Image (cartoon, rainbow, N blue to C red):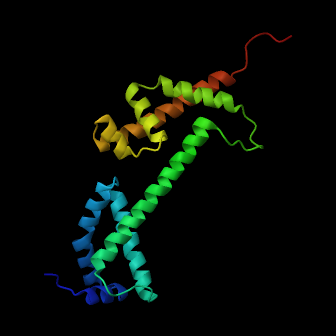
Amino acid sequence: MDPYSNEELFRGIKNRDEEVLGYIIKRYKPAVRVMIRNLGGSHENANDIFHDALMEIFEKIVNNAFPLKGKLENFLFVICRNKWRDQIRKRKSLNNYYSTLILNYDYVDPGFNIDMDLYKDALQKSIENLGELCRNIITLVLEGKSQKEVAGLLKKNYDYIRRRYHDCMKKLKELARMAIGEQNEPSHENIN
């Protein structure tokens, strides 16, 4: 049985009661961690989401914009889930933007005078020069798949894919820089 009623929990949050806040953290944070990890997040993501959700609940209670009817636990989990989904949407949107920018070059700033075909070719050649696993990881992520989905598709551990993704992106950037540098080098022919 919970040592605090729902009303006591809400009052404790509003009054910043350390004992009540400690109880809420001890009681609900592990469950939020499990939920966020099951949705593809990390331990750190879960801690950030939990903290942000508590702050949102606090602000709503202080501003009398929070319905004090329902269980705190339900509100907390809904807010955490929604905050995580918002982060995922932002990440996918950002990934889609970057993949479009990197692979399609549909938009070029008129003040940015570069040969986009050169960069596109260099990037595509660089992807082709990656090892098979890196090529698969990068391609799937650029298609909008989450790293968790990539792990499932490639039958690998999520943490392994997450580490490999960062290593692969680092390698891709190095290869692309080298390819672009080679294509931009001036000819060593005599000009007279």
* Residue at image location 34% in from the left, 64% down from the top: 47
Which quarter of the figure has residue 98?
top right
User: 26 or 148: which is nearer to us?
Assistant: 148
* 2 up-or-down from 141: above or below: below
Q: Residue at x 86, y 10 (%)?
A: 192
Q: Where does residue 67 sit, x and y in percent of width and height?
A: 38, 86
Task: List x then y, in percent, for residue 181.
Answer: 63, 26
Q: In the image as oriented, which residue stretches furthest toward the right?
A: 192
Identify which residue, 14 or 146, lies in the foreground. Answer: 146
The quarter holding residue 180 reads top right
Residue at the extreme left: 1
At 73% from the left and 15% from the top, the residue drawn is 187
Point 42% across, 44% down: residue: 145
User: Is 182 placed above or below 101 here?
Assistant: above
Image-based side of 124 in relation to 33, left or right: right
Name above or below for residue 45 compared with residue 2. Answer: above
Number of numbered discs visible in the structure rendering: 0
Location of the N terminus by quadrant is bottom left
Can you give x and y, in whole percent of width and height, for residue 73 in the image? 28, 76
As drawn, 96 above or below 183: below
Residue 108 in picture, x, y percent from top left: 71, 41
